[in-house]
């Protein structure tokens, strides 16, 4: 079912919208489509439209706050096994074919202040970061029911992309001036761009991508978040929230439990995808934070390839009445994994709809849009 922006905003701010929202956040991993085709999947099942997922149309606000006018990527080597490229940051990357969609960096451009200053121009403010024609299109789409979304670069994610995880973590201690200048540049650009954009339309959601955690916890702790990242978040959020923005959403895999409090203090309202395999339990988070934090995801993607009994236990726990009181978008915690039988995925969809009190899927009724924005 297609939702309107007003309904989605109300859901994520714990308003009464009359029904839960059940979505597919990311879609299948590479290779699953071939598995399902061999199991007799229809065309609609392969592109997920046959599952009648809930979704809300999204409009880009016209602001570019991240890399701007960066060099075009260049393919250096293309073999049956790998594609070796130089990316927009000048990193050498390697993409294994047939098993991955994101290339792994083999080198990083920033090691010190001098190397950062060579990269800094693509993160600096420029008036042409605002696409005024896109902004006008976003206004019209918003009037038609679409969510208007703005994004800012991650306060951990960008240093990690520039330096690599280990060097970025050490920079908090060994190169604080470097880290300060990187984050100050991100903040200055984001504030100047979004301040202008929000004078002309209401941004419904501010999004930030961090991916700063693994199973053992986040790579930056509460102290680093409060000292380095939170002031950046707050500068942007204070402007937008004063002008009507209601949702501040963060995307980070892994175990984020140790830093939830610090990010809530920074203005964050929503987190996803709440990975159970990394120790994230959306029910426990709801019990602890109540209406201070809304969530997307949280259903263990690995369970749906186990058995009907395992799926029922997972859904009855995650979709319990406490979680149906708003502030929750139900869905898998990441991409549908390879080895998921089509029959179990169908069972997951139909049982979830039953538990949530949604009508059964109708033959011929189709719709799907990736919800991870």
Image (spheres, rainbow, N blue to C red):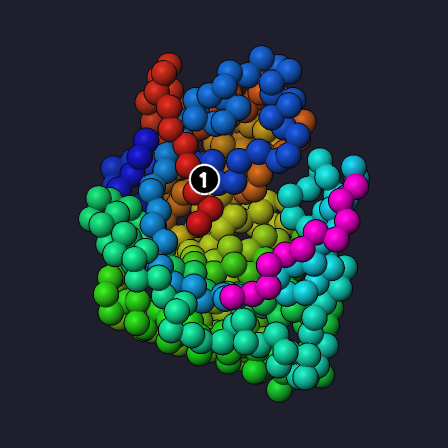
* 9 left or right of 214 in image: left
Q: Position of residue 185 (x, y in %)?
A: 51, 78
At x 38% / y 73%, what residue is drawn?
Answer: 127
Task: Tell me if residue 70 is in the magenta stretch.
Answer: yes
Looking at this rendering, what residue extends furthest in the bottom direction? 177
Image vertical order of residue 123 relative to residue 297, above or below: below
Residue 258 in view in this figure: no
Q: Looking at the image, is 10 positioned above or below residue 118?
A: above
Quarter of the image for residue 112 reads bottom right
Location of residue 338 (image quadrant) = top right
- Dot 1 falls on a residue whose secondary structure is loop
Is residue 161 shown to the viewer in this render?
Answer: yes
> Magenta segment, which residues?
69-79
Give the position of the N terminus as an image quadrant: top left
Residue wearing tag 1: 370
Q: Position of residue 201 (x, y in %)?
A: 24, 62
- Residue at 66% of width from left, 84% of height from top? 113
Q: Nearer the viewer, residue 340 or 110?
A: 110
Query: Given the current orientation, which residue lies at the most extreme left position?
Result: 143
């Amino acid at each position: 079912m297609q939702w309107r922006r007003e309904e989605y905003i109300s859901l994520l701010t714990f308003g009464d919208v009359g029904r839960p929202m059940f979505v597919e956040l990311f879609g299948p991993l590479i290779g699953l489509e071939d598995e399902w085709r061999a199991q007799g999947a229809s065309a609609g099942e392969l592109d997920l439209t046959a599952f009648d997922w809930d979704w809300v149309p999204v409009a880009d606000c016209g602001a570019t706050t991240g890399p701007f006018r960066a060099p075009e990527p260049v393919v250096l080597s293309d073999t049956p096994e790998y594609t070796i490229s130089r990316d927009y940051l000048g990193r050498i990357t390697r993409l294994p074919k047939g098993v991955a969609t994101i290339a792994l960096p083999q080198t990083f451009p920033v090691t010190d202040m001098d190397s950062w200053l060579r990269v800094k121009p693509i993160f600096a403010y420029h008036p042409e970061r605002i696409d005024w024609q896109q902004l006008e299109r976003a206004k019209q789409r918003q009037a038609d029911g679409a969510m208007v979304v703005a994004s800012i670069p991650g306060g951990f994610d960008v240093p990690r992309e520039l330096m690599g995880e280990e060097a970025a973590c050490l920079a908090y201690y060994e190169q604080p001036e470097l880290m300060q200048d990187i984050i100050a540049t991100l903040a200055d650009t984001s504030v100047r761009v979004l301040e202008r954009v929000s004078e002309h339309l209401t941004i419904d959601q501010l999004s930030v991508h961090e991916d700063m955690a693994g199973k053992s916890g986040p790579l930056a702790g509460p102290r680093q978040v409060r000292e380095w990242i939170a002031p950046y978040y707050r500068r942007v959020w204070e402007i937008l929230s004063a002008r009507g923005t209601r949702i501040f959403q963060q995307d980070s895999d892994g175990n984020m439990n140790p830093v939830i409090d610090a990010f809530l203090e920074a203005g964050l309202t929503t987190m996803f995808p709440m990975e159970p395999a990394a120790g994230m339990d959306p029910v426990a988070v709801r019990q602890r934070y109540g209406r201070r934090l809304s969530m997307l995801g949280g259903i263990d993607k690995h369970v749906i390839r186990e058995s009907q009994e395992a799926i029922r236990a997972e859904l009855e726990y995650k979709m319990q009445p406490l979680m149906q009181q708003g502030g929750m978008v139900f869905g898998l915690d990441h991409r549908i994994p390879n080895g998921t039988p089509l029959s179990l995925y169908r069972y997951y969809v139909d049982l979830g709809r039953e538990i949530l009190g949604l009508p059964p899927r109708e033959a011929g009724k189709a719709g799907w849009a990736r919800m991870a924005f």
